[in-house]
Image (cartoon, grey):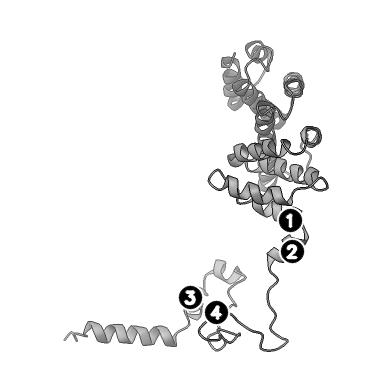
Amino acid sequence: MVTVVPISDFLKRAEVALENTCIAEKYNSLFLTYPCFKECPTQHHHCNTTNKFPYPQTNGSHHRKKINNNHKYPTHNSRKCARDPSRAIISYLNVINIDNYSRVYTKIRLLLDATNVASIVGDILQKCWTATIYVNVYIKLLTDINTIYDIKSTVFEVVSKNIERFEFKSNIPDSYELFCEKQKHKAFFLGLNITLIKLCKAELVSHKVLKDYATQFENRVLIEKEEYHLDITLHILLELCKSVQGIVSDPNSLALKIECEIPRLKFLIQELAETH
């Protein structure tokens, strides 16, 4: 015989069950047998229902006061940012986008001065080639800063130093970790290449610098024998050819000179020739 329980009684029982049962302990009992759950560092963290609010609340507000010396207020990031403008600017770089650009730029402008502008430009450029999805926003930010401080020499210096890091060197044996490290290195240089093109178009870097950069990789592709570096070099030349007309002397002729036995790179060579 099936017993029919009214919905109101069912809801009351459910509420009582939730009040008397700790959800975290319930999950522990359900998944403790799984190896992946055992390795999780949070498996020993239990709900603390006896001391949920260690700070007393006054008049219904959420302002919490100290009880004793064992309870300390967490250090607020804004205090550190107030003492270190560079730290604050870096936090603004993490949130700036097209929609909030004017508001965030105003805050950055108030923190900039002649003593920290060089380091901030370096931070912005690092953001350019590690977060290329926002490169247009960062280039606009550099352009606006350049109207206040002359940063072209700083931009050139930072870019030149990073171009020298092209060679990939690692002591890691051939493994998945080596593959991941190579992918990060490749993403870095493709981001650097895209940034350099954008800087040239924004007239923060001269066309001659970009031409010398292209020539360097144009010469390198003919002598490069290592598959990994040849792959990056072809990607860089392809981006240059697509973005700046005439930056590579003759992509079609260059593609014909490249002897490549690697099938996946032949598609890059063919695409490079088609950019002429």
What type is the residue that disc 3 sits on?
A: Tyr
* Residue 171 visible from this viewpoint: no
In the rendered structure, which disc, 1 or 4, sits on the residue that comes first in sequence? Answer: 4
Judged from the image, the secondary structure of the residue bearing numbered disc 3 is helix
Any mark on residue 80, and which?
2
In the rendered structure, which disc, 1 or 3, sits on the residue that comes first in sequence? Answer: 3
In the rendered structure, which disc, 4 or 3, sits on the residue that comes first in sequence? Answer: 3
Percent x, y for residue 125? Answer: 71, 40
In the rendered structure, which disc, 2 or 1, sits on the residue that comes first in sequence? Answer: 2
Mark 1 → mark 4, Cα distance in angstroms? 29 Å
Residue that carries the numbered disc 3 in the rendered image: 27
The residue most toward the left is: 1
Name the mark nearer the viewer: 4 or 3.
4
Residue that carries the numbered disc 4 in the rendered image: 62
Residue at horizontal 77 percent and vertical 58 percent from the top: 84
Judged from the image, the secondary structure of the residue bearing numbered disc 1 is helix
Residue that carries the numbered disc 1 in the rendered image: 87
Which of 56 and 16 lies nearest the eye of the viewer? 56
What type is the residue that disc 4 sits on?
A: His
Mark 2 → mark 1, Cα distance in angstroms? 8 Å
Mark 1 and mark 3 residues within 8 Å of each other at the beta carbon: no
What type is the residue that disc 1 sits on?
A: Arg
Above or below residue 224? Residue 143 is below
Percent x, y for residue 156? Answer: 79, 32
Mark 1 → mark 3, Cα distance in angstroms? 39 Å
Q: Quadrant of the C terminus?
A: top right
What type is the residue that disc 2 sits on?
A: Lys
